[in-house]
């Protein structure tokens, strides 16, 4: 199966290791970073969502109108707009991008962050709302006659959109989470299910849980799977580990000074979402896992989002990513700490190795399927 690479479409140059140098939305940097991804072999970039961050939809439209190939993954939280409005926004963006849009729906795992924009639902209620929201958006994208909706969270009458996506029948739906409620919602509705980087055994367990949820929802086609990491690469193993420890020291210093809290809106309390709790539990069980997974980057940020690292030479990190591919993960998400420089280096030195090895695996698999008697021998 083909492999895809997802990067980050940051709107400024700030990260956990360095403060931003200008405005929160720096349009020149936004385009420069996106173009670096397009020019160095990445397939798509994520326009993330935060309560006080620049609106990702117009930022994505700005980039999509200026680049020809890079695909867009737009993060959206259902609490910020009515689904009838959002469906039109997404369809318009899919038109602007000539059919390069996927929408990533965020249920929200932190009550404080949700309440910043007036969302006071419980976590279970938020999952119920997200599921209903996705169903409505899908129907708006594919229905050309007015319809009514009366659900648990949304009610409207006689609605029909006059703007439809370029992709047929509709753009893809991306969803993530690590709780049973997330597996149930994403297993039922998502085309892509997103996981944060965990050890191989735990990742395999999550994949099977989502597949089981998809079957329980009556699906015969489970979602594709995406796993996210923070790669730290260097020409030698020694240099990569020196860079990794230097990265953690810098993050720790910024956190102790208070600047990381202000930038990333951490409250300092224990995380509420299951995904972050899992990352911290894995960090407590050990710093190194499998071929190259390293947990101190997650521990020092309190399990904040995508935060487990893969450390090593490009060859080592590529082989670690291939281990996840062999589990059934065909979308690999990566974001460095020097957003621009790391996107270029990862694209130059890691992506080609992974693509070459995936092509070999696919060729071997195809040859095996056409070799008489091979299946019987293997069984």
Image: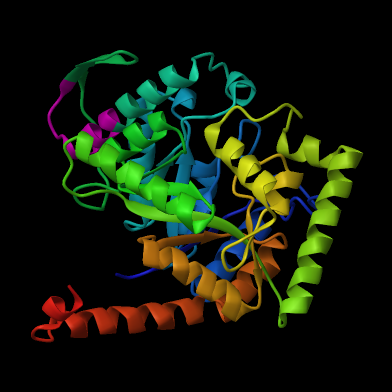
Percent coordinates x, y for residue 50 in the rendering: 60, 36
Q: Is residue 6 visible?
A: yes
Percent coordinates x, y for residue 309 in the rendering: 64, 59
- The type of colouring in the image is rainbow
Quadrant into which the C terminus falls: bottom left
**Range of residues picked out in magenta:** 135-147
Image side of residue 187 versus residue 374, left or right: right
Quadrant into which the N terminus falls: bottom left
Prevailing secondary structure class for the magenta stretch in the rendered image? helix
Q: Residue furthest right?
A: 257
Find residue 330 and report its image quarter.
Answer: bottom left
Is 280 contained in the magenta span?
no
Percent coordinates x, y for residue 162 in the rendering: 24, 35
Image side of residue 179 versus residue 302, left or right: left
Is 136 contained in the magenta span?
yes
| Residue occupying the point 38% across, 67% down | 326
Percent coordinates x, y for residue 283 in the rendering: 67, 47
Q: Is residue 162 above or below residue 370?
A: above
Using the image as rendered, state which of residue 209 and residue 227 is in the foreground: 209
Image side of residue 346 versus residue 222, left or right: right
Using the image as rendered, state which of residue 154 and residue 2 is in the foreground: 2
Using the image as rendered, state which of residue 101 and residue 278 is in the foreground: 278
């Amino acid at each position: 199966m083909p492999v895809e690479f997802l990067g980050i479409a940051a709107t400024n140059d700030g990260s956990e290791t360095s403060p931003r140098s200008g405005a929160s939305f720096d349009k020149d940097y936004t385009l420069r970073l996106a173009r670096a991804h397009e020019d160095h072999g990445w397939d798509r970039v994520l326009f993330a969502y935060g309560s006080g961050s620049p609106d990702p939809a117009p930022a994505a439209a700005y980039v999509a109108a200026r680049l020809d190939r890079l695909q867009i993954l737009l993060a959206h939280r259902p609490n910020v707009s009515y689904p009838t409005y959002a469906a039109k926004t997404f369809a318009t963006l899919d038109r602007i991008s000539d059919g390069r849009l996927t929408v990533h729906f965020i249920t929200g795992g932190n009550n404080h962050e949700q309440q910043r924009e007036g969302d006071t639902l419980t976590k279970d209620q938020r999952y119920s709302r997200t599921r209903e929201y996705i169903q409505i958006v899908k129907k708006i994208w594919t229905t050309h006659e007015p319809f009514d909706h009366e659900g648990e969270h949304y009610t409207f009458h006689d609605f029909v959109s006059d703007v439809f996506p370029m992709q047929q029948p509709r753009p893809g739906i991306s969803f993530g989470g690590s709780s049973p409620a997330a597996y149930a919602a994403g297993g039922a509705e998502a085309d892509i299910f997103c996981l944060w980087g965990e050890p191989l055994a735990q990742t395999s367990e999550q994949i099977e849980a989502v597949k089981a949820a998809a079957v329980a929802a009556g699906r015969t086609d489970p979602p594709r799977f995406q796993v996210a990491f923070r790669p730290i690469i260097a020409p030698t193993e020694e240099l990569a580990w020196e860079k990794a420890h230097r990265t953690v020291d810098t993050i720790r210093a910024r956190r102790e000074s208070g600047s990381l809290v202000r930038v990333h809106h951490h409250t300092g309390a224990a995380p509420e979402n299951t995904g972050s709790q899992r990352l911290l539990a894995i960090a407590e069980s050990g710093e190194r896992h499998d071929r190259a997974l390293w947990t101190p980057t997650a521990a020092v940020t309190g399990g904040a989002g995508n935060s487990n690292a893969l450390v090593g030479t490009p060859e080592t990190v590529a082989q670690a990513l291939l281990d996840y591919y062999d589990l059934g993960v065909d979308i690999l998400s990566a974001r460095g700490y020097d957003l621009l420089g790391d996107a270029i280096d990862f694209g130059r030195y890691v992506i080609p190795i992974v693509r070459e090895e995936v092509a070999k695996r696919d060729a071997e698999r195809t040859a095996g399927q056409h070799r008489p008697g091979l299946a019987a021998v293997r069984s």
